[in-house]
Every structure is written in C-alpha cells, then in structure tokens.
Image (spheres, grey):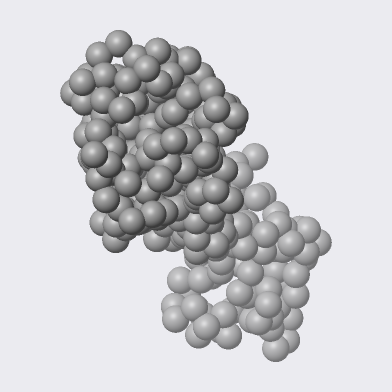
C-alpha cells in the first residue's frame, strides 16, 4: 500500500470530516468543490478504501475514514510543530550550541552572560566543555564545538579568531605580605619570591606570564607549577608564594581580603581573550546570537579598577 504523504490531501480530508460537507470545506479552504473532491478521490485511491459516505445535508465518515482521522489530525499537528520548530531555529530561539572554553574564563561576568542567554532562549540547549587554549581551538576545528573561548588569538588558517575582551592581570600575595601596603613597588623587589603559576594546562597563558616576568627583569624566578586556579589561590593565601592572576577570578578573595594586590607597574598587564569558530562554517541562528552576545559583552565591559589600601605612593 502506498502511504499518503501529501499534506494537502490530508488537510482537505480533515476539513471535510470536521465540517461534514464538501461545500463547507471548500469555502473554508478557499478552493472549488471539484478541486477538493479530486483530492479526496486521489487519497481514497491511494488507501484503497472510501473515506466518506454522502448523505442528505453532508457526509459521514466510513469506518476507514474514522480510522484515518486521528492519524490525519496528528500528521497536521506534527507538520505545524515542525514548521514552528524550524521558525524558532531560524530566529535563534531553539537549537543546540556547543561551547568550549578555558575553565578560568568561567568567571562571574561570563556566567552571568550565559545565565542571561539561557533565560532569554530557554529552548536553546547550551553544552559547555572546558579545555586548554590549544584544545579549545582543536575542538572547534574538528567541529566538536561550535564556538570556543580561549586566551590569545588562534592563528590556525581554518579558524576565525576575534579578540573579544582583555583579562586584566594583577599580582597578588597573602594578607600581611610586606609589599601589600597599597604603594607602588619596583619589580626588583619581587626578586627571590616564589611564584605560584600554571603549567601545561594553560600553555598560552603560561608563555604570556613568563614573557612578562622576563620583560620586568625577573629572569630566573622559582615557579611552583599548579594546574588548578583554586589551588593556586589557596597556596598564595597560605604564603607559599605570589601569583599573577586575572582580576576577574579574584572577586571573592579580594572582598574577604584573604589575598591582597601588589601594585607593581612593570607587571601590569592584560591577556587577550578570543572567540573562535570555523571559517566558512555554518553557524545556526542560536550560535550567532550567542556569538553576538559575547562580542557585545566584551565591547561594553571595561576593566574594573582594583582597590588598593594605602596612599598609593611609590615606595623608594
């Protein structure tokens, strides 16, 4: 048996069944009665059974027609649902996005952005995975992530990499550190200090950090290798060394004053954050909406001033 897939025939059949007449259905569908009669004839031929019995004043469903009606109504409902789903996808109101990002970028600002995006587009499924900067680019390049957020620009030719923000970096030490007096200090005063830094898991950040130390004249610093931001902060709080950390990841510790900022002008820096996606790839409307939100947040945000205690004079 040929399964009918012509929605116009199904729509005509349902209209006749609901209005109990060919003439009334023709008027509702804005078609001629011969036209809808022909469609029913085609449908009955495909099914091999009559669907209507003509009676005085209208029509009645045959047993075959009564059996078909609930399925025909379900087909029309499914078609409407499908059209609405496609429309939502086109408008960016539904769909699925995979976002890969460096874990330390999941600061309060980004999580607020993603939370607002979820509230605005509740039917969009946002899958998030964390990785190193190098891995973020690889995931996007392989198509395993639609968008990526990483430190510095990804120069691979198959990717578009756009800087969307700059992470302000500050030097921090435990509360009570001799240089945590709110005054400016020369980089040489940190000679002999141990640094609690990252190794391997954030290679782009590590290279950036090491270049900054060299540029400030700290040529052979002792670095304690750590692969966790939380562990890095806890070790600095415990006095195991100093660290250079993105200010956006220090809100709680600075509020509680368990960590203090050391004002070292030679080490003031920021690291660029870039969003990456495949060149010439298809980005769904939902992914484009998220990309636009990330870019807008980067343009609208400005580095917040880091509060320091004390008079702010440079130490002689």
At a point 25% along the width and 14% down the height, the residue shown is: 219
Taking depth in this image into account, of 275 and 147 the one nearest to the observer is 275
Where does residue 224 sit, x and y in percent of width and height? 47, 15
Where does residue 132 sit, x and y in percent of width and height? 43, 23
Q: Is residue 40 visible?
A: no
Where does residue 311 sit, x and y in percent of width and height? 33, 56
167 over 159 or under it: above or below: below
Q: Is residue 92 visible?
A: yes
255 over 280 or under it: above or below: below
Q: How many marks?
A: 0
At a point 63% along the width and 69% down the height, the residue shown is: 14
> Left or right: where does residue 203 sit relative to residue 18?
left
Where does residue 103 sit, x and y in percent of width and height? 49, 33
Give residue 168's quadrant in the image. top left
At a point 30% along the width and 11% down the height, the residue shown is: 220
Taking depth in this image into account, of 47 and 274 the one nearest to the observer is 274
Outermost residue, front side: 316
252 over 21 or under it: above or below: above
On-image quarter of the C terminus: top left
> Left or right: where does residue 1 sit relative to residue 100?
right
Taking depth in this image into account, of 301 and 164 the one nearest to the observer is 301
At a point 42% along the width and 29% down the height, the residue shown is: 243
On-image quarter of the N terminus: top right
Outermost residue, right side: 63
């Amino acid at each position: 048996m040929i399964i009918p897939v012509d929605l116009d025939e199904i729509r005509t059949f349902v209209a006749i069944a609901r209005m109990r007449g060919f003439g009334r259905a023709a008027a509702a569908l804005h078609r001629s009665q011969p036209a809808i009669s022909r469609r029913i004839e085609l449908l009955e031929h495909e099914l091999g059974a009559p669907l209507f019995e003509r009676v005085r004043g209208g029509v009645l469903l045959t047993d075959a027609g009564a059996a078909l009606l609930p399925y025909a109504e379900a087909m029309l409902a499914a078609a409407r649902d499908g059209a609405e789903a496609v429309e939502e996808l086109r408008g960016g109101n539904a769909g699925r996005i995979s976002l890969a990002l460096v874990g330390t970028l999941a600061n309060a600002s980004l999580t607020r952005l993603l939370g607002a995006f979820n509230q605005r587009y509740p039917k969009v499924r946002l899958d998030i995975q964390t990785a190193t900067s190098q891995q973020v680019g690889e995931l996007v390049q392989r198509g395993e992530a639609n968008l990526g957020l990483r430190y510095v620009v990804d120069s691979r030719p198959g990717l578009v990499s756009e800087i969307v923000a700059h992470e302000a970096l500050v030097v921090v030490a435990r509360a009570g550190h001799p240089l945590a007096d709110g005054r400016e200090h020369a980089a040489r005063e940190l000679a002999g200090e141990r640094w609690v830094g990252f190794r391997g898991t954030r290679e782009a950040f590590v290279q950036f950090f090491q270049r900054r130390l060299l540029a400030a004249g700290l040529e052979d610093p002792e670095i304690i290798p750590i692969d966790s931001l939380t562990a890095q902060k806890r070790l600095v709080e415990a006095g195991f060394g100093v660290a250079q950390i993105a200010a956006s990841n220090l809100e709680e510790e600075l509020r509680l004053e368990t960590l203090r900022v050391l004002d070292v002008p030679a080490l003031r820096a920021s690291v660029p954050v870039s969003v990456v996606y495949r060149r010439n790839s298809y980005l769904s409307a939902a992914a484009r909406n998220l990309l636009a939100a990330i870019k807008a947040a980067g343009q609208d945000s400005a580095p917040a001033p880091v509060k320091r205690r004390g008079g702010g004079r440079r130490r002689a």
